[in-house]
Amino acid sequence: MKPFMKHIFFYSVILLLFAGCRKNETVALPDVLPFENKDISIVRVQTTNLPELISELHFSDALRGVASDYDGKIYLTEDGGVTWSVVFGELTPAFHVSQFLFQSKLVGYAIGKADGTLIGGTILKTVDGGAEWRVYYNIPGTTTFERLAMDPITNKLFLLVSDYTAASSKQCYVISSSDGALNWSSPLSYLPRTY
């Protein structure tokens, strides 16, 4: 490249870099975001009595929702997130919910694990929309529940389980329940070990 062309190229790059920068420029956000419609919109809520660090959150409608923190507590709101109350926190501070899954507005599950303890994988269940939770299923020891899924037609539940049988390895498998997490199948499939 000739020296003259090098200078033009250099100044063009500099001009492009600074052409879009304006001091104190504000970007106007659109009135409606792409996913918003008459049923879905973003509303800023000033929340009280909810910890800053939340591990999971689920709303069944615009007013009723549940949240969990890293201290093993589950919170309920019935006013769209303005106020929250603790509705569960009985296991241990090390226990935390890793997922909420609701079959309906009333029936829901929370799966979790307790890091560094022998509580193992635990499923909590609610039948009143999250106001009360109880331990419904547990595999103690080194087992953890990773994800819970539901077939929307049959309501059959599928649970991804990790069993840490050795310090350096993990065996993963899938089990299923057709009776609302009361009884579980033998492993349906085994997944490759991950390290």
Image (cartoon, grey):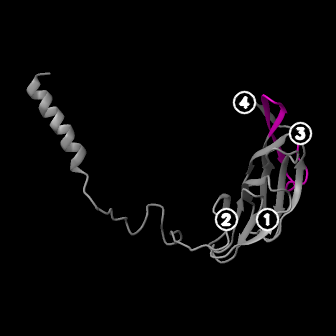
Mark 4 highlights which residue?
194
Q: Residues within 10 Å of mark 4 (few under 14, many from 20)?
A: few
Query: What residue type is disc 1 on?
Result: Val
**Among the two numbered marks 2 and 4 on one chain, the one whose residue lies closer to the N terminus:** 2
- Which of discs 3 and 4 lies nearer the camera? The answer is 4
Residue appearing at x 80%, y 56% in the figure: 93
Mark 3 highlights which residue?
186
**Among the two numbered marks 1 and 3 on one chain, the one whose residue lies closer to the N terminus:** 1
Q: Are marks 3 and 4 in contact (CB under 8 Å)?
A: no
- Per the rendered image, the range of residues in magenta is 162-185
Q: Secondary structure at mark 3?
A: loop
Please tell me the numbered disc located at residue 107.
Answer: 1
Q: 114 or 150: nearer the eye?
A: 114
Q: CA distance from mark 1 to mark 4?
A: 33 Å
**Among the two numbered marks 1 and 2 on one chain, the one whose residue lies closer to the N terminus:** 2
Residue appearing at x 72%, y 57% in the figure: 100
Q: Secondary structure at mark 2?
A: loop
Q: Secondary structure at mark 4?
A: loop
Instruction: Please tell me in which quadrant of the rendered image residue 72 appears.
Output: bottom right
Task: Name above or below for residue 149 compared with residue 186.
Answer: below
Mark 2 highlights which residue?
51
Q: Is residue 17 left or right of residue 141?
A: left
